[in-house]
Amino acid sequence: MKKTNMIPLLFAGVIALTGCNANQKNAANTGLNLANMDTTVSPGTDFYQYACGGWIKNNPLPPEFARYGTFDKLRDENQTQLRSLVEEVQKGKQSAGSEAAKISLFYEMGLDSTKLNADGAKPLQQQLDAIRNLKTETDLSAMVATLHKEGMTPFFSLNVNADEKNSSMNIVQLYQAGLGMGDRDYYIVNDAESSKMRDAYKTYINKLFTLAGYNATEAASAVNAVLKIETEIARVSSSREQLRDSQKNYNKITVDQFKSKSTLLDWTVYFKTLGLENMKELDAKQIAFYPALAKSMTKITLDEKKYYLEFNLLDGAAPYLSDAFVNANFDFFGKTMSGSQVLQPRWKRSLTTTNGALGEAIGRLYVAKYFPASSKEKMLTLVKNLQKALGERIQNLQWMSDATKAKAKEKLAAFTIKIGYPDKWRDYSKLDVKNDSYWNNVCRSNIFEFEYHLADVGKPVDKVRWYMFPQTVNAYYNPTSNEICFPAAILQPPFFNPNADDAVNYGAIGVVIGHEMTHGFDDQGRNYDKSGNMTDWWTSEDAAKFKAKADVLAKQYNDIVVLDSVHANGEYTLGENIADHGGLLVAHQAYENTLKGKSVPQPIDGFTNEQRFYIAYATLWGQNIRNEEILRLTKMDPHSLGKWRVNAALRNMDDFYKAFNIKPTDAMYLAPDKRVVIW
Ligand SMILES: [Zn+2]
């Protein structure tokens, strides 16, 4: 289930999470590790290379990674910490039904290669048979509901989130889904890259059916059916750019109205299977998707739909079955789509899954061991200073009217700030973990999660709930609750270093805080008011001026060539680029505020405080990345690639030019009239 429309700092859909050379700790005391730099390149030529070239050279891509950056490395170290926590739990006393017993057994089931390989496709045989035995379209509608509960997303997905126009209440939201390759372009674009992907996808589908015991004719029919149905879904799906338009994607209607619009499923049966038979209204998001898909599905036989559902199940289960299934899944998603060379070791895969299923139980252990209470205090001060700086910047904006400024400042003052870990922990007592099979545990955990959210339908939004685990190296802004959240795991170097000078902390975690804050005011966030309700609180002139500036920024990124002839997508990445640039501006101003009435700090390691601010920022985004992953992320990730989060954002900062004495003849140089300042 999709947890709100919260906006993370880093794309969560990265296939390979972790690596293995965790020996290079960030310089503990001065905050900057000069070995990360490449001073043979001048800052005005390529600042990213200048600040991160050493890191890039010293941290080659481990074979299991598609991308390996500062973030990934921290996540890697984080995995090692989580492993030791789970292993301590395994060694300790575990009373039956306790969280410790659940963590321990879940993890062990994922490690037990002997059982996994002996079982083969057996753990999902019953579910496959149930699909094969469906006799009618009505049976099929009930099955779609069952699969949704179990964590698969055939055709669309059902989620429970805050109603965007009544943000204190929860509502059911339906999102377009059902594409195994994730993006509609892979199905409908006819370039070499997409057709290569389609061919590999066919091989993958065939392989899964063959492994599950279907004969060659059946497997071939399954390949045709899946491609046929997913191509129809792709044709009626909104593009990623269209999905950014919050207003157009808000379509609250009564359930009766919704049922009358589309015969895609027997909706009465579908909702009844989920226990939602009394539901009165829902938000159908991409509302045109359902009638359009219903129309194209009239050409599809029941048998073909059954293959499609079976594939959803096989694809969903593959990472949790025998090595043959796991390898088939990795060959397609890891190797072909992302360019990774080898599978992650088993312990990392099992740990990631266990962590996903029992995240707050493990999070509680993580916080107790690794999160010093003093960090929370320091962060609160930083956040407060950033909030003040953004308020000042809003007040001084030339392009915004006083009326809109007043509302923007109200919204800023109303931020909910979550730091470290939740005040209230999740209760896992109703989650069953058993020794039947790893896949059954994953399935039960998905149902547990689904029901947890389903219980919220029609109820008030729980304002203290977290949408990330404390042990997650990331941060987020959630527009419907107007909240920013910084989990414990991001509050460590190189993001946050209690021993470093202010310039470094403001350049690193300060920019992250500013980044999340400005999401409240980016091309999406600006559509929500201080209470998280989607309403237009801008004067029309201000909205037009905002859009004109945002368009210039989008164009700057559209001009970037990410690989060969492929360009960045400036419209799709607009919100994140506004946040990166805005975060830099706000953090820089907050840092300047700390210096008021004080003498300028002495240079450290030969770098001025101003220079250290920008170097610390760039350090966060150093990364090595495979070409396949560049292409995949350019399609799927609303964030820019590391290099452009640095170079493209900094080109718009007047103070950056001053700090490094960058000249009009330098490659990084952008003429002042070409620079954009939004916040
Ligand atoms: Zn962001």
Image: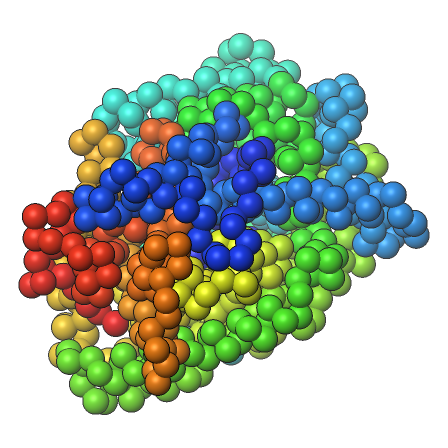
Expressed as whole percent of the image width and height from the top left, the position of residue 359 reads 67, 53
Vertical position of residue 111 compared to residue 514: above or below: above
- 669, 185: nearer the viewer: 669
Residue 429 quadrant: bottom right
Q: Does residue 633 appear anywhere in the picture?
A: no
- 145, 656: nearer the viewer: 656
Expressed as whole percent of the image width and height from the top left, the position of residue 148 reads 57, 47
The number of numbered discs placed on residues in the rendered structure image is 0
- The reply, left or right, for residue 461 in relation to residue 564 is right
Vertical position of residue 83 compared to residue 330: above or below: below
Q: Residue at left 19%, top 63%?
A: 658
Give the colouring mode of the picture.
rainbow
Vertical position of residue 357 compared to residue 462: above or below: above
Q: Residue at left 48%, top 56%?
A: 31
Q: Residue at left 25%, top 85%?
A: 395
**Farthest top residue?**
216
Q: Does residue 621 appear anywhere in the picture?
A: yes
Expressed as whole percent of the image width and height from the top left, the position of residue 396 reads 22, 83
- 534, 608: nearer the viewer: 608
Expressed as whole percent of the image width and height from the top left, the position of residue 280 reads 52, 70
Q: Residue at left 81%, top 54%?
A: 99
Please state, as top left, top right, bottom left or bottom right, where the C terminus lies in the image.
Answer: bottom left
- The reply, left or right, for residue 440 in relation to residue 152 is right
Residue 139 quadrant: top right
